[in-house]
Amino acid sequence: MPLGTLTAGVNYDIFAYASSGSVLLDPPVAWTNDTTRATALTRQNGILIKSGAPTRRYLGTFRTTSTTTTEDSSLKRFVFNITNQLPRSLRRIESTSSWNYGSHTLRPANNSTTNRVEVLIGDLGPLVNLHVQEWGRSTVADYIAVAIGEDSTSAASPNAVTSSAGTDSSSPTLDSTLSSHLVVTPTVGYHYYQWLESGSPNGITLFRGTAVSGGVTTYGGMIGVVNY
């Protein structure tokens, strides 16, 4: 379906209808905002349809990345199908080998909001399952951590379990493994999941992304799956 000239960063619903033995598509229907439809869905004989227009069957939703494009990638799952759903991988790896951060305040990993994955949920039900892992160390005795933010760049999601690691000034060159795991059924609409980190304000905290250790390349990042 040609997208034509739409508005970037907007969700659009797709509806189909029958005409003279052919299946045709209505023009895409824009949402009011990231999480609110302008035109509601309802069910007829168990099938989702356009409210007030029972001949229009709901096929799915997409989100634009420009005025003429959408995206379906491991970073941005922006094409939602209501039928024939399959697990879709999510993946964000930080290519920087290492960086420093000296605060207990949660922030995006490596101070980059690109360290996230994004999904679009057209109808309630799909499950998002994500795991973050990276490595860190500090020159003083303190605690460092990673977390996953749900539509937030500064707060850990209550839908995730998170581990922190105690650092030891007597072994400042030893890395600790840090991880967080989130499982959630998101509400309808657009959502992002941000990889977060917390360092030590009392010494030098070093975090690792993609690095070679013992001849093996290790990858710090976020991986998972959304089921649609």
Image: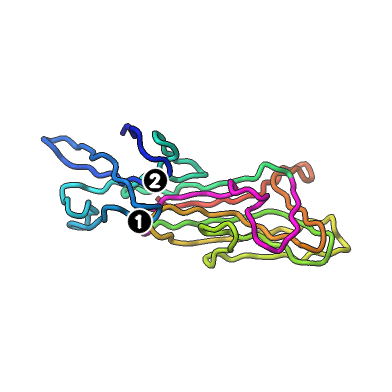
Seen in the picture, residue 17 relative to 32 is either above or below; the reply is above
Q: Is residue 126 left or right of residue 49?
A: right
Q: Residue furthest left?
A: 20
Q: Earlier in the sequence, mark 2 or mark 1?
A: 2
Identify the amino acid type marked 1: Thr
Identified at 48% across, 41% down, the residue is 73
At x 38%, y 40%, the residue is: 7
Badge 2 element: loop
Q: Position of residue 172 (x, y in %)?
A: 85, 58
Residue linked to disc 2: 10
Q: Amino acid at mark 2?
A: Val
Q: Residue furthest right?
A: 170
Residue 45 percent across, percent down from the top left:
17, 57
Pointer 2 with pointer 1, Cβ within 8 A: no
Is residue 87 one of those drawn in magenta?
no
Give the residue at x 38% y 52%.
33
In this rendering, would 123 be left or right of 147? left
- Determine the secondary structure under disc 1: loop
**Which residue is under mark 1?**
36
Residue at mark 2 to residue at mark 1: CA–CA distance: 11 Å
Please determine whether, in this image, residue 203 is positioned above or below residue 75. Answer: below
Q: Position of residue 171 (x, y in %)?
A: 86, 60
Crowding at label 2, few (<14), some or many (≥20) Cα neighbours within 10 Å? some
Q: Which mark is residue 159?
A: none
Other-residue count near label 1 (Cα within 10 Å), few / some / many at <14 / 14–19 / ≥20: some
Say whether residue 120 is magenta. Answer: yes
Quadrant where the N terminus is found in the figure = top left
Instruction: Return the residue nearer the eye: 70 or 167.
Output: 70
Q: Which residues are magenta?
A: 98-125
Q: Front-most of 196 and 39?
A: 39
Q: Is residue 125 above or below residue 11?
A: below
Q: How is the image coloured?
A: rainbow
